[in-house]
Image (cartoon, rainbow, N blue to C red):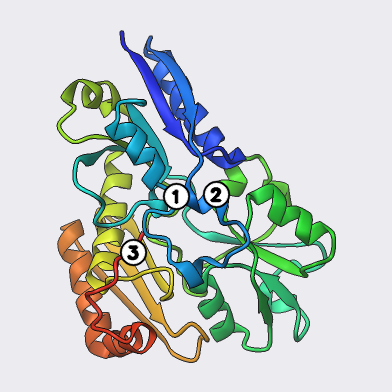
Amino acid sequence: MAHLRIGSRGSQLALWQANHIARLLRQRGHQVELEVIRTTGDKMTDVALAKVGTKGMFTKEIEEALAGRQVDLAVHSLKDLPTEGPPGFEIAAITKRENPLDVFVSKHCSRIDDLLRRARVGTSSLRRQAQLKAFRPDLDIRPLRGNVDTRLRKLESGEYDAIILAAAGVTRLGLTALVRQVIPAEIMCPAAGQGALAIEIRLGDSAIGQHLAFLDDREARATTTCERALLNKLGGGCQVPIGSFAEVRGGRLHLEGVVANPDGSRVLREARDGNDPEKLGTEVGDSLLRRGGDQILQEVHGQPAAAPQQP
């Protein structure tokens, strides 16, 4: 059996994720230790991600430790990984997926529809902001960063009337009692890869890869590959609201994609079925671009749609 060192961010959720993988590896007889690594994104908690972009913000330092052989593998939220990452690494496993949808959390309201006009809703995700504004243009969307506990404390203190979180993080931290509504993808299409964990290793490290092969979930690999293919085609980034959600229906992949203006004034949605994850994601991305997604991307970035890259 092997002695394996896991690199992870230090947030409560990141540590849960890393410890979850560590437990599964220990059950296989491996010795496992955790190395906590502080990333650029962890240091910039007072800056809206939309203003600085997120390419590698939550992964760069961990990948440096991986390249320098300080750790043998890294556990990431898949949605934090760029669709085109730096050379020298590979995703050895994508674990069985937790609920990929977003959830509505509030002290006083049971659904988004119940919020009063000008109610304060916290999120720093432009993807969530745009779809919320399209659904409820009367809401006051305010920036919200920090780990899940920090966000919940701000809600409890009355700073917000409601906040939007990923269902997966809330579930993993045992906080589902606080959830008032699981938001349907038709209202809020989730981020590509949301709910899935990615296990990253050095490219070609077959020995480590073999130890991790049992963690790779076939359905999670197919759905997230499809979602990330759409994202890659759109060249999306934190500055552009893009949603991508794939699921298996009747043995086939069903993909829903969204691209929108940050103010929610224009939201393009596309849905399609297929068998090949990469092909389906690329086709839906192509369709969104043809229908006006390219114009949205150019308006936001001031450059061709293929230029920016998305984490």
Residue at coordinates 25% horizontally, 53% vertically from top-left? Answer: 251
Q: Tag 3: Cα neighbours inside 10 Å, few (<14), some, or many (≥20)? A: many
Q: For the C terminus, which image quadrant?
A: bottom left
Residue 239 located left or right of residue 68: right
Q: Which residue is mark 2?
A: 42
Please say whether residue 1 is visible from this viewpoint.
yes
Is 11 located above or below residue 121 in the figure? above
Q: Earlier in the sequence, mark 1 or mark 2?
A: 2
User: Within the image, what quadrant is residue 288 found in?
Assistant: bottom left
Residue at coordinates 56% horizontally, 67% vertically from top-left? Answer: 48
Q: Position of residue 74 (x, y in %)?
A: 37, 34
Amino acid type at circle 2 is Asp
Marks 2/3 in contact by CB < 8 Å: the verdict is no
User: Within the image, what quadrant is residue 180 found in?
Assistant: bottom right
Q: Earlier in the sequence, mark 1 or mark 3?
A: 1
User: Within the image, what quadrant is residue 67 found in?
Assistant: top left
Marks 1/2 in contact by CB < 8 Å: the verdict is yes
Which residue occupies the foreground of this view, 77 or 106?
77
Q: Which mark is residue 310?
A: 3
Amino acid type at circle 3 is Gln
Please say whether residue 96 is visible from this viewpoint.
no
Which residue occupies the foreground of this view, 58 or 209?
58
Is 112 located above or below residue 198 in the figure? below
Q: Earlier in the sequence, mark 2 or mark 3?
A: 2
Which residue occupies the foreground of this view, 194 or 108?
194
Q: Position of residue 99 (x, y in %)?
A: 49, 50
Amino acid type at circle 1 is Phe
Q: Which residue is mark 1?
A: 58
Q: CA distance from mark 2 to mark 3?
A: 18 Å
Residue at coordinates 23% horizontally, 65% vertically from top-left? Answer: 281
Residue at coordinates 19% horizontally, 68% vertically from top-left? Answer: 282
| Total numbered labels | 3
